[in-house]
Image (cartoon, rainbow, N blue to C red):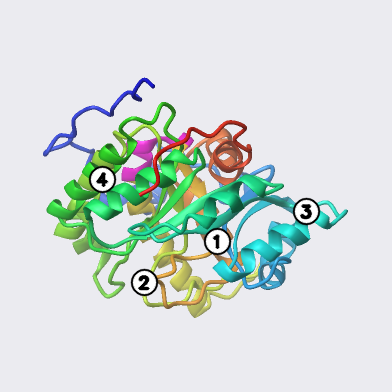
Amino acid sequence: MASAPQPPRLRKNPRDLPKLPLSAFTPPNSGTLERFPLPPSPSTLQPAQVIDANVISQDLNYSKWKKEAGQVLGNKIRGVVLALPGAEIEAALKELKASSKESQIISFIVPFAIEKPDPAIEALLSSSAVPTSLSTVFSKSSPEAVEGLKWALGRGVPVDIDIQATLSDSLLEAFEDMITNASTGIESVPPVILSNILPPPHDLDLPIVRLMNHPTYLAFQSQVANLSLFPNVYIKFLPPSWDAPTPQTPLPGSPIESVDTQQSKEWKRRIKMYLGPVMEAFGYQRIIFGSSPSLSSRSPSNVGDWYEIARESLTELGIEQDFVDAVFFGNAEKVYGKKQEEKPQEEKP
């Protein structure tokens, strides 16, 4: 079997990303409006439909999600990618297969241990009536992790990787080598979707002016530039692990600037600083919206509140309608919405 084309050799010093001035994240003063018109109002750019690609639930009906989604998101939703506790997945798949009701579940996410995958998962994947994908947690590189990821990619389904480690230069290089080595020998490498990166864990006490030249932010720019060189790698746009709950979004037409409104604006300013380098490196075709935070996050996040903050952060950067529709719907449909008919067989670790 022919080997898949390998990504270009990663550069230690990737291409220089543009350094955006602070003014890019705040509206211009009234004297510049005629020469530099404001980007479209966030209220005018809405996705036509939405797939939530990261719904972590305790039940097949994802009841808590439905309660939090609210009317705006609830009316737009066309599908969810559902992650259930490992012990519940087999029963849920059987229940869904036996049900005559139309479901909005476009894919199930099945967890596996990257250093020791359970061989029984393969039977679960092949028997599922809906598309399935795999998910795992990365905290360190090892030969066992390479073999475990190779096994997962060999199933021919998307693989989510929740990065629960600080990506130092050495760990980033090891992570890149893991993806490269795990992909070797696989004819058609399925998508790899990374989470806990957009936005990354962050200290909200760090002033935004200092953040722009802070070593962690400069490292983030370099990291996403390197990771974007893998053509099958996608980034999930999830609630961040910032040791604070997602701020509530104000009610439409509310004349009062509440504490939550101020917090929401501050979050959006920071999110846009991280969105910029990811958009530059990955483009809009490889960013996927989801509402459940990383499993490493200890902070609560309301589905409807995160949807509004994520949507406004994106649209305030002056992007086009096609970008919005891709991030909130099209990319998830492309990655998760099709069941693989033929899966290449690889040796089990």
Instruction: Find the distance from the CA under tag 4 to the CA under tag 3.
Output: 36 Å
Start-end of magenta stretch: 277-285
Q: Nearer the viewer, residue 39 or 94?
A: 94
Q: Quadrant of the N terminus?
A: top left
Q: Earlier in the sequence, mark 4 or mark 1?
A: 4
Q: Would you call the spot at circle 4 few (<14 residues within 10 Å), some (14-19), or many (20 or more)?
A: some
Type of amino acid under label 1: Ser
Q: Earlier in the sequence, mark 3 or mark 2?
A: 3
Q: Residue at label 1?
A: 291
Q: Would you call the spot at circle 1 few (<14 residues within 10 Å), some (14-19), or many (20 or more)?
A: many
Q: Is residue 281 magenta?
A: yes
Q: Residue at label 3?
A: 97
Height in image: 283 above or below 69?
above
> Which quadrant would residue 90 be assigned to in this image?
bottom right
Q: Which residue is at a point 38% across and 31% down the rendered structure image?
A: 186
Q: Earlier in the sequence, mark 4 or mark 2?
A: 4
Type of amino acid under label 2: Trp
Q: Would you call the spot at circle 3 few (<14 residues within 10 Å), some (14-19), or many (20 or more)?
A: some
Residue 178's disc is 4
Q: Secondary structure at mark 2?
A: loop
Type of amino acid under label 3: Lys
Instruction: Find the distance from the CA under tag 2 to the CA under tag 1.
Output: 15 Å
Q: Residue at label 2?
A: 242
State yes or no: discs 3 and 2 in contact (Cβ < 8 Å). Answer: no
Instruction: Find the distance from the CA under tag 4 to the CA under tag 2.
Output: 28 Å
Instruction: Find the distance from the CA under tag 3 to the CA under tag 1.
Output: 25 Å
